[in-house]
Image (spheres, helix red, strand yellow):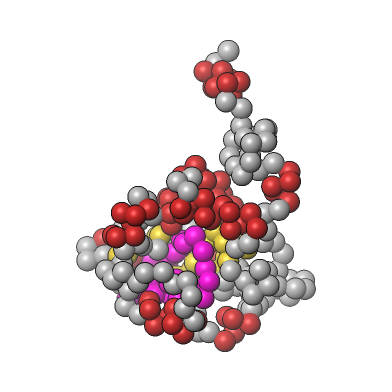
Amino acid sequence: MGLQAVLRLLYPPQCLLCDTLVTTDFGLCGPCWRDTPFIAGLVCDLCGTPLPGEDPGHPVHCDDCLQLERPWAHGRSAMLYRDNGRKLVLALKHGDRLDLATPAAGWILKAVRPILTPGMLVVPVPLHWTRLVQRRCNQSALLSEALARQAGLDHCPDALVRPRNTHTQGGRTREGRFDNMTGAVLPHPTRGAHLRGREVLLVDDVMTSGATLAAATEACLSAGAGTVSVAVLARVAKDA
C-alpha cells in the first residue's frame, strides 16, 4: 500500500464545512453543496450577480452596474455572500482556514473562464500592512495564487500596495465606501511595472459596492495595464 493510500485510510477526506466523509479531497458533502449559493446561468457581465432569464447572446448588466460606472471591463463571482458562501469567506478570512484557498480558487476559475484571456496577469487586491499583521495573510493573495496556478497564468502578488489604512468598509454608505477608497491603492513603486501592457485579472474575496475593486483597477490602469477584469469568491447581492 502506497503512502498516499495509507494517509487516505488514516485521514479520509472530510467535507470542508462539516465532519461528513466525502469521496474527494477539498470537497463538500451533498447537503453542504446544496446550501452553498453557487452562481450559475445568466449573470451581470461586470460583477457576476445572477440575473433572471435566458442568455440573450450579448453582455447584460445588473441595476447596480447600470447605475455605477465600473472602471473594469468584465467581472465574475463564484457564489453569493450568504449561507455557506458567507461561512466559507469568513473561515478563510478570519478562521485561519488556509486550506480553503485551493478549492475556492477552483470555484472562481469555473466562473471566470469566459472572461480569461491568454497571457493574463493575476493580481490580488492588497491589504494595508496593519491588517496583514492582524490576519497573518492576505486571503485575496492566497486565492489569486491558487487561481493563477490552476489557470496556468502569471501571478504578481505585490503589483499593488495599500499605503493608507482604510479600516473597515462595514457600516458605510455606498458613497462613503467609494470616498474611503480614494487613493487607497497604488501600483508598487517597482513591482508595479509588471502591470504595464498586461491584461489583468484582479482577485478579491468579496465584492459589495465594488469600491475596493474600483480603486485597485484604477491603480492598475495608472500603471499602464491594458484591460482589467475582476474575479471574487462571493458577491453581496441585493437579493442575498
**The N terminus sits in image quarter:** top right
In the rendered image, the vertical position of residue 64 relative to residue 168, given as above or below: below
Query: Residue at image x 36%, y 62%?
Result: 126
The residue positioned farthest toward the left in the image shown: 190
Q: Can residue 183 be seen in this view?
A: yes
Q: Nearer the viewer, residue 5 or 171?
A: 171
The residue positioned farthest toward the right in the image shown: 53
Query: Residue at image x 46%, y 54%?
Result: 93
Query: Residue at image x 59%, y 84%?
Result: 66
Q: Which of 80 and 70 is in front in this view?
A: 80
Q: Position of residue 19 (x, y in %)?
A: 64, 36
In the rendered image, the vertical position of residue 165 relative to residue 16, given as above or below: below
Q: Where is residue 75 in the image (x, y as percent from the top left)?
A: 54, 69
Point out the stretch of residues depicted in magenta.
198-222
Query: Residue at image x 49%, y 81%?
Result: 173
Q: Position of residue 224 (x, y in %)?
A: 32, 73
Is residue 132 left or right of 59 when viewed as pictured?
left
Query: In the rendered image, which quarter is residue 211 located in?
Result: bottom left
Q: Can residue 150 be seen in this view?
A: no
How many dots with numbers? 0
Query: In the rendered image, which quarter is residue 37 located in?
Result: bottom right
Q: Where is residue 118 in the image (x, y as percent from the top left)?
A: 48, 58
Instruction: Confirm whether the magenta stretch covers residue 103.
Output: no
**The C terminus sits in image quarter:** bottom right
Instruction: Confirm whether the magenta stretch covers residue 214.
Output: yes
Q: Which of 207 and 169 is in front in this view?
A: 169
The residue positioned farthest toward the bottom in the image shown: 67
